[in-house]
Image (cartoon, rainbow, N blue to C red):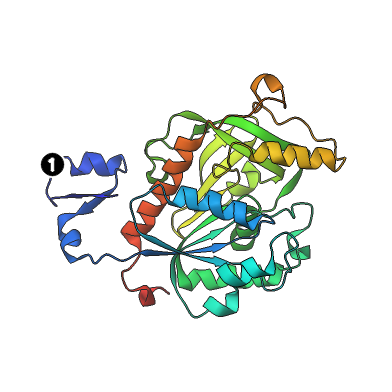
Amino acid sequence: MPIKIPDNLPGRVTLAQENVPLILEDRALRQDIRPLQILILNLMPDKIGTETQLLRGLGATPLQIEVTFLHPATYTSRHTSQDHLTAFYKTFEDIADKRYDALIVTGAPVEHLAFEEVGYWKELVRIFDWARTHVYGSFFICWGAQAALHHYNGVPKYPLERKHSGVFLHRVVRPFHSLLMGFDDFFPVPVSRHTEVRYSDVKKHKDLEILIEADETGICLINDEKNRRVFVFNHLEYDAETLKNEYMRDTAAGKNPDLPTHYFPSDDPEQEPRITWRAHRHLLFSNWLNIIYQGTPYDLSELG
């Protein structure tokens, strides 16, 4: 939560330079409180598991949040029952006239396809364009981040020779950035993807700032402060067992996957993996929600 301070507090400049969440007394006196409205476009096959992971991250803040789940109308889910979708999900047509404080778009197991070959691509592009005027800030994950970066900035994705799978040491590129408050200089992050975006393409766009990276797996997090978009290519939202379940699934399917790197104790898949990234998951979601909370208008009709 942001700290309310007097407008002329001597330490204000130092705290602001370190991006400590602040709200000046004058604004606090005029600020009304309401729940943040978060729209989650869930593109994952295991929708229930993904819901739980994201809500766990969003629950890392004392802010009151109301969540709306969205799924593509132009794709029929084979892994989630229609009863569940009917009970808990909406389609774009249901919410097209509404406005939200934030949008989250998950990853999807379609990395092997060109973006335009994905069955719901036209619908996704429509949602991306709608978000320009109907959403204050956006948070894109894995393939969702690659898709959004491609649509908004024309950045391509490239296939990897071997899938990046495991828990890799990452580093903070911009200490004291408001998204990274409380982060250690180095910390572990789960990675699970077949494709990547490259530094040379990202650096062509002055609005895109790389905040987290790793020697072994490259770019992890890009921030577009001007357009209030966060692109996260890896998976701080994962549970301890998620990479194990993916490895066992691919092994059973005869895909001969590599053992996830730095994941199983002693590289023994018979041993239970441990979660080592929980604190940074909470920090990232909490910091992002604080940024949304401080900037979004009380009256969402003012968006756009």
In the figure, 205 relative to 133: above or below? above
Eyeballing the image, is 39 above or below 255? below
Residue toward you, 24 or 67: 67
Question: Which residue sits at x=59%, y=32%?
Answer: 214
- Can residue 156 be seen in this snapshot? yes
Residue 257, given in percent of the width and then of the height, sits at 80, 35
According to the picture, the residue beneath numbered tag 1 turns out to be 10
Q: Residue 195, how many percent across, how many down?
A: 72, 45
Tell me which amino acid carries mark 1: Pro
Return the x and y of residue 154 as percentages of the image width and height: 64, 59
161 sits to left or right of 19: right
The x and y percentages for residue 146 are: 64, 53
**Residue sitting at the far front:** 83
Q: Residue at x 80, y 41 (%)?
A: 250
Instruction: Tell me the quarter of the picture where residue 181 sits.
Output: top left
Residue 206 visible, this orientation: no
Quadrant of the image occupied by residue 101: bottom left
Q: Compared with residue 227, is residue 284 higher up or lower down, i.e. above or below?
A: above
On the picture, is 242 further left or further right than 185? Answer: right
Task: Please tell me which residue lies in front, 304 or 51.
Answer: 51
The image quadrant of residue 73 is: bottom right
Label 1: element kind: loop
In the image, 223 versus 62, the foreground residue is 62
Left or right: 244 as drawn, with respect to 213: right
